[in-house]
Image (cartoon, rainbow, N blue to C red):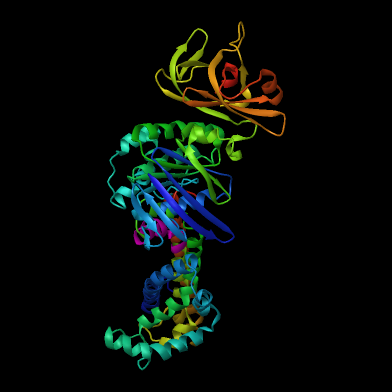
Amino acid sequence: MIDVDISSRLGDFSLTARFAVNSGITAIFGRSGAGKSSLIRMIAGLSAPDRGRIALGGRVVFDGAASINVPVQQRGVGMVFQDSRLFPHMNVERNLLYSQWAARRKSTIGLAEIAELLGISHLLKRRPYGLSGGEKQRVAIGRALLSNPQLLVLDEPLASLDASRKAEILPYLLKLKNEFGIPMLYVSHSLGEIEQLADTLVLLDAGNVVAHGPIAQMLSNLELPQLASGPDAGSLLFARLDHYDEQWQITEFGLEGQILQLPGQLGTVGQDARIRIKAKDVALARKAPQEASVRNVLSVVIEGITETSGPYAEVDCRVGEQHLRARLTRHSVHELQLEAGQQVFALIKSVALDQ
Amino acid sequence: MSFYLTDAEWAAIQLSLQVASLAIAIALPPAVLLGYALARWKFPGHTLVNALVHLPIVLPPVVTGYVLLVLFGRQGMLGSFFADVFGIVFAFRWTGAALAAGIMAFPLIIRPVKLSFELSDGQLEEAAHSLGTSRIRTFLLITLPLALPGILSGAVLGFAKAMGEFGATITFVSNIPGETRTLSLALYTEMQSLSGDAGAIRLTVIAIAVSICALVFSEVISRRLSRRLGGQHD
């Protein structure tokens, strides 16, 4: 549980943040210069806000009024920086175990376990110099984890890596989340990363926390143009991998009692999955289509329709407990006489869901 | 002309090495601490301290020597304090020569030390703090080892300066054979004597040889250090 209520002036820039989030992965999202790094530096104790209060897991680590400011060494916050910041004069193993030999911290997780999980066991005797960007970052994550943190803070950990390196790290972060359940604050300006990882999203804009809440809800909130507009806007659906059809190379996901088919083999049966569907890839029909190529036909209920000033309308549909957005032309909405409360069919081409 | 060193020459070399070693031992720790403070901290009087530190470079050495004589002479404020409290006498002793050499070498030592602390901007220290080490431990485990190449080159430069120091030394502790007559002072003495040319040339060659040895030694050490630090300084 992270409970933040602070304000601070840094030159011309002022930061005001007020939010409370539960454990899991919390993403702090915002454009460059929105104040993301300043905010997490204050949470980690690397700098102090002018006033306010910060509590981590029920423990007050900063309270301006009560003059409480627990120093960074005692906050139990593991930091992973964008530029990994490994100690160049120590090998990977010394780096990983730094907080144990230098600060006498005890970790509940063992070195071997972490190294295995992060795929860095073969690097232990190497020095940071000469490691690839992705390897350095995995060592940095391991080093932070082995300091036995109550909270892991990752400040744009993938920002300095190229696309293939990013893809190399993300699965490890997911594994960390699933295997250790350690709360994480994940700072990023990439929605793609956040959609794959985060449970909760804190939206920061020009130094203010604009909104915070569960990821899927935030992503489909039309009142948050930073997240919900643009050609790639859409919905995030939580599904379960049910079946893989080898003959046709199609993976089937169970979504609120209905079936969603995606091309390719996308994991192992039984695993939880996040599927992102762009609003522009969703069509609506009053009747289930016959003899059509569209593989995915979901029965949905229209929750609301928002017409924009342009030619488009955003239709918010409900699939069981989850939301699916469709972007249609206003003309279509008018012709089909779509209204809130109607039961309709959402059509999604499998090919559009190529992950 | 014999190729073997005379007793007087040996004495001068040994004394020079002894004086320069003590000078570095005296000057290096404060140079590291002050270099760190000047590189990393902003404090009132920063510019003034920085100027004071570099003063021995621009002052005539004879002035530095005279100031030392006034302060550290037998009757001087600091001189009598050290004599009474610690039993250390500087005036006309080799320890005084080391003090003079250390002070003259100080600006040369602190420069590369300060530069190497300026090279990194404290980000690794931040990481170390977040991993739980205190400021002092972080300084000892991270900051200091990473500044070692700079500290070493400061020490070598300072050692060379201390070996050859002349003006402040002769002003402060005079030219006493076996006590304060270092290589430079011996060379000066030879030049003053009537039959001195051969002796002066011998001492010149010795001075060059000792200097080259020091430079080679420092090069070897700094390569080893660079390798230890991961090769990014090569």
Judge by depth and name the residue closer to the eye, A13 or B29: A13
Q: Residue at x 61, y 15 (%)?
A: A286
Q: Residue at x 49, y 26 (%)?
A: A322
Q: Position of residue A46 (x, y in %)?
A: 43, 56
Query: Would residue A42 be counted in the magenta stretch?
Result: no
Report whether residue A53 is seen.
yes
Type of secondary structure dominating the magenta stretch? helix
Q: Position of residue A107 (x, y in %)?
A: 29, 43
Judge by depth and name the residue closer to the eye, B27 or A161: A161
Q: Quadrant of residue B26?
A: bottom left
Q: Quadrant of the N terminus of chain A?
A: top left
Q: Quadrant of residue A108?
A: top left
Looking at the picture, does residue A196 appear above or below residue A101?
above
Chain part drawn in magenta: B135-151
**For this view, does A102 lie left or right of residue A14?**
left
Q: Position of residue A37 (x, y in %)?
A: 51, 50
Q: Position of residue A93 (x, y in %)?
A: 35, 42
Judge by depth and name the residue closer to the eye, A106 or B211: A106
Q: Residue at x 54, y 21 (%)?
A: A301
Q: Quadrant of residue A175?
A: top left
